[in-house]
Image (spheres, helix red, strand yellow):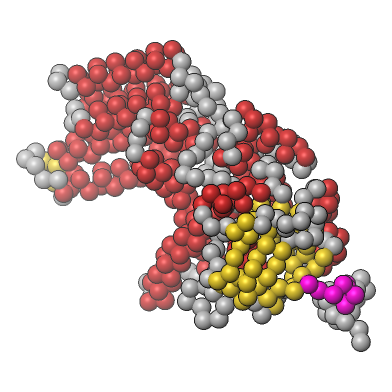
Amino acid sequence: MPKTPLIELRNISYTYAYNTSPVLQNLNFSVSEKQIGIIGSNGCGKTTFFQIIVGLLAPDKGELLFQGKSVKNKADLRNLRKEVGFLFQSSDDQLFSPTVIEDVAFGPLNLGFSPVEAKRIAVETLAELGLSGFEDRITHRLSGGEKKLVALATILAMKPKLLLLDEPTNNLDPRTRKCLIDILQGLNLYQIIISHDWDFLNQTNSTLYQIEHGHIHRCEEDHIHVHSHIHRAGDHPHRHD
Amino acid sequence: MDERFAQGDSLLHRRDPKAKIIAAMALVSVAAVSDSFIVATTSLVLGMTLLFLTKLPLQPVLKRLLAINSFTLFLWLTLPLTYGGSKFVAIGPLPVSIEGLHIAALITLKTNAIVLTIIALLGTSKIANLGHALETLHFPEKLCFILLFSYRYVFIIYQEYRRLVRAAQMRCFVPTTTIHTYRTFGYLFGMTLVQSWNRATRVHRAMILRGFDGHLIPLSQSRYTTKDTVFLSTMLSLTAILALLNFL
Ligand SMILES: Nc1ncnc2c1ncn2[C@@H]1O[C@H](COP(=O)(O)OP(=O)(O)OP(=O)(O)O)[C@@H](O)[C@H]1O
Ligand SMILES: [Mg+2]
């Protein structure tokens, strides 16, 4: 555990243009655990929270710190984005090159690696994710699950320290889902995972946070659990008094 | 975009994109401005020869040509009747302008020649490589960027449009000539623009997050070799001959 957290949000508020109420309000957060799960109802601001972390949205108020230093200019953002990978809710938005290998090599090329090195990194990353042989596949003809894994490869190829995953198991079949869980468990980097998939969160994350009314707070572990038996609303967190 | 014509390993695929861009610009401009049948026919033959050299499968190329020629067909239907001029032949009750037929034929020849040349010379390089080549040729940076991205976004717009049309069809929308139809098409058109814009923004964000700063770096960089010089000189000589044919 480093003394200064990789990312820290201080008193962040954010309101979308044309909206009256803020999505996030005086939110404080720091990446202090290796694996963090984030829950919250639809539209509570989970994706917005991630976009603030990578600087896609500039907060109205508050401060974003990267390795203890305030993120102010383009150069700071560039450094931050080198270390923080963001897996989008929709992989269709994330893959834009014609072939898989070009898409995975895109990040390393931008980081200044030579084409030969970038290609090597891309091939290695694909192999690590069990995607060997996918190099020359056409990205928009992959299945949803394959797209998700390739999108993950494009991010891991940049060797980030922190991974932000926005509902990664949506629309995955049990086999791909299992595959993704195994991959994430095997990665030695910080991970923040947004998910509605309780079983998945249970298997991957050690700490749960909830976003609610513009704030984020840590869930008490004893109070939240998942039932494996059938039970009305059994897949939602609840307490037994 | 699948850049399907760029897959291959022919003589033309292996040429440096810089040489191909210059050759294509020269050939296309000579073909485009000429109004001589000899030039138009020769450039069509040249285009077909180039296509033959690419060893591309014919079917997708023919599909493209078919799409282009649905446009020229429209010219064949309108120009002979509307062009005017002094010489006419009567087809049934209609006076058909000889000059109109002439122009339609010329445009058809030139269009096909130009499309074939572009497929053979520019289609056989990947977009990233073409963009990089344009930058090396000192094209204005903004212009390169627009060229590269209009290509990509045209595709996104088309995808979004198909998606929305499908959604409308799922709900049993059948176009007729009612106000409901016109309104629906208005909505579809508007939504296509909004959705494409949103999607384009998200794709651009994905690129920025992976360190994109306006320059596409190609994964495989070709080196300009003597073979490229030979190719370019041959192409430019042919273009010069083509230009001289104008004065025959
Ligand atoms: N571009 C935008 N412009 C205006 N309002 C927006 C925009 N994007 C999101 N919002 C609003 O901000 C709120 C938070 O959105 P956000 O996408 O962060 O939610 P979320 O928690 O990720 O939801 P979900 O679980 O459905 O993905 C929502 O109420 C949404 O309507
Ligand atoms: Mg979301």
Assign the C terminus of chain B to one quadrant of the image.
top left
Reply yes or no: does residue A220 show up in magenta: yes
Q: Pick the residue in front: A140 or B103.
A: A140
Residue name at image x 63 percent, y 75 percent? A26
Using the rendered image of the protein, determine whether residue A76 is visible from the camera's viewpoint: yes
Q: Pick the residue in front: B146 or B3.
A: B146
Q: Residue B121: x, y in percent?
A: 41, 28
Pick out the residue farthest to the left.
B86
The quadrant where residue A202 appears: bottom right
Image mark count: 0
The residue stretch that appears in magenta = A218-226
Residue name at image x 56 percent, y 28 percent? B220
Q: Residue A130: x, y in percent?
A: 78, 41
**Above or below B51: residue A193:** below
**Above or below B27: residue B65:** below
Q: Residue B19: x, y in percent?
A: 39, 23
On screen, residue A186 versus residue B79, left or right, reads right
Reply yes or no: does residue A73 show up in magenta: no
On screen, residue A182 versus residue B160, left or right, reads right
Q: Is the stretch drawn in magenta largely helix, strand or loop? A: loop
Q: Pick the residue in front: A195 or B43.
A: A195
Residue name at image x 57 percent, y 49 percent? A78
Q: Pick the residue in front: B24 or B183.
A: B24
Using the rendered image of the protein, determine whether residue B147 is visible from the camera's viewpoint: no
Residue name at image x 71 percent, y 53 percent? A162
**Above or below B57: residue A46:** below
On screen, residue A74 versus residue A46, left or right, reads left
Q: Residue B175: x, y in percent?
A: 44, 68
